[in-house]
Image (spheres, rainbow, N blue to C red):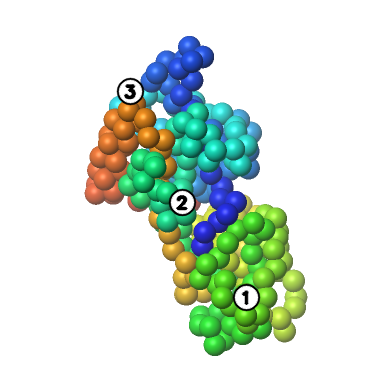
């Protein structure tokens, strides 16, 4: 499920500019990554910003939002010009070079298909010949061998909306499914009425990966990461984490 063009975000500390050392400026990709990061004009919400903002407030930090092109984040993080981004250690070449939060949410990719079509996506023997709708620039390790051997055909689209739209075509003789995180897909279905009652999910999980915050290794962030991890553990134990996720998903 490694997404080579992973939707990422980072937060900056502008001490050199005169801003307070306790100000955390969260850089957000312009399109967001709902429901994990939701962008509505200048307003930023979603699961990840909410959890970070609550933790920052608890430990005396002020969070501000700044829109930053996502493809710059890893380079800036490596150069310690930003403080953190959303990532998984499994997707990083040298994870020990960074500090990591506890896992915050888990990405679970499923096959999504038109509910008027037959579900042929629960095992590899059924999936032969299927057209698999994928996101341009993303990698799908658990399916790559099937792509390489031309057992299934990859069809790229630039956005998740375009991926779901492709499933609405009345071509039920074609075995077609999109690969997408279930929470992302459910959020889009609720936001766009044309998808309502039109799509179904496989029971099969194509891939699963926890998402963390990835931090630059600085002394200042070492302290915050320790505090942040304590906070994540606490809200998971007391059920607040589940409430935040369900509230963001509007379940």
Helix, strand or loop at mark 1:
helix
- Location of residue 51 in the rendering, given as x and y in whole percent from the top left corner: 39, 39
Q: Nearer the viewer, mark 3 or mark 1?
A: 1
Q: Residue at x 67, y 58 (%)?
A: 136
Asked if residue 157 is positioned above or below residue 62 in the image, the reply reads below
Among numbered discs 3 and 2, the one appearing first in the sequence: 3
Q: Residue at x 41, y 35 (%)?
A: 216
Helix, strand or loop at mark 3:
loop
Q: Mark 1, residues whose alpha carbon is within 10 Å: few (<14), some, or many (≥20)?
A: few
Q: In this rendering, would 54 be left or right of 87?
A: left
* Farthest-out residue, right: 170
Q: In this rendering, would 3 be left or right of 176?
A: left
Asked if residue 208 is positioned above or below residue 32 in the image, the reply reads below
Q: Which residue is mark 1?
A: 148
Per the model, the C-alpha gap separating discs 3 and 2 is 30 Å
Q: Mark 3, residues whose alpha carbon is within 10 Å: few (<14), some, or many (≥20)?
A: few
Q: Which residue is mark 2?
A: 92
Among numbered discs 3 and 1, the one appearing first in the sequence: 3
- Location of residue 180 in the rendering, given as x and y in whole percent from the top left corner: 56, 62
- Is residue 249 or residue 132 the one in the foreground? 132
Q: Which residue is mark 3?
A: 60
Per the model, the C-alpha gap separating discs 3 and 1 is 51 Å
Q: Nearer the viewer, mark 3 or mark 2?
A: 2
Which quadrant of the figure contains the C terminus?
A: bottom left
- Location of residue 62 in the rendering, given as x and y in whole percent from the top left corner: 41, 23
Per the model, the C-alpha gap separating discs 1 and 2 is 23 Å
* Farthest-out residue, top: 18
Among numbered discs 1 and 2, the one appearing first in the sequence: 2
Classify residue 15 by image quadrant.
top left
């Amino acid at each position: 499920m490694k997404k080579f063009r992973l939707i990422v975000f980072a937060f900056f500390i502008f001490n050199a500019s005169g801003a307070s050392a306790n100000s955390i400026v969260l850089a957000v990709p312009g399109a967001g990554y709902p429901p994990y990061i939701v962008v509505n004009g200048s307003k930023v919400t979603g699961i990840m910003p909410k959890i970070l903002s609550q933790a920052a407030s608890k430990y005396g930090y002020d969070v501000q939002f700044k829109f930053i092109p996502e493809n710059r984040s890893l380079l800036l993080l490596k150069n310690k010009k930003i403080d953190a981004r959303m990532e998984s250690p499994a997707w990083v070449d040298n994870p020990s070079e960074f500090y990591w939060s506890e896992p915050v949410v888990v990405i679970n990719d499923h096959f999504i298909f038109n509910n008027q079509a037959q579900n042929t996506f629960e095992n590899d023997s059924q999936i032969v010949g299927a057209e698999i709708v994928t996101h341009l620039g993303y990698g799908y390790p658990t399916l790559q061998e099937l792509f390489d051997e031309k057992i299934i055909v990859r069809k790229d689209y630039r956005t998740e909306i375009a991926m779901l739209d492709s499933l609405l075509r009345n071509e039920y003789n074609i075995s077609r499914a999109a690969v997408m995180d279930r929470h992302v897909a459910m959020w889009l279905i609720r936001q766009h009425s044309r998808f309502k009652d039109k799509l179904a999910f496989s029971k099969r999980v194509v891939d699963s990966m926890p998402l963390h915050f990835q931090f630059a290794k600085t002394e200042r962030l070492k302290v915050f990461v320790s505090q942040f991890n304590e906070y994540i553990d606490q809200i998971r134990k007391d059920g607040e984490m589940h409430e935040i996720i369900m509230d963001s998903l509007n379940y």
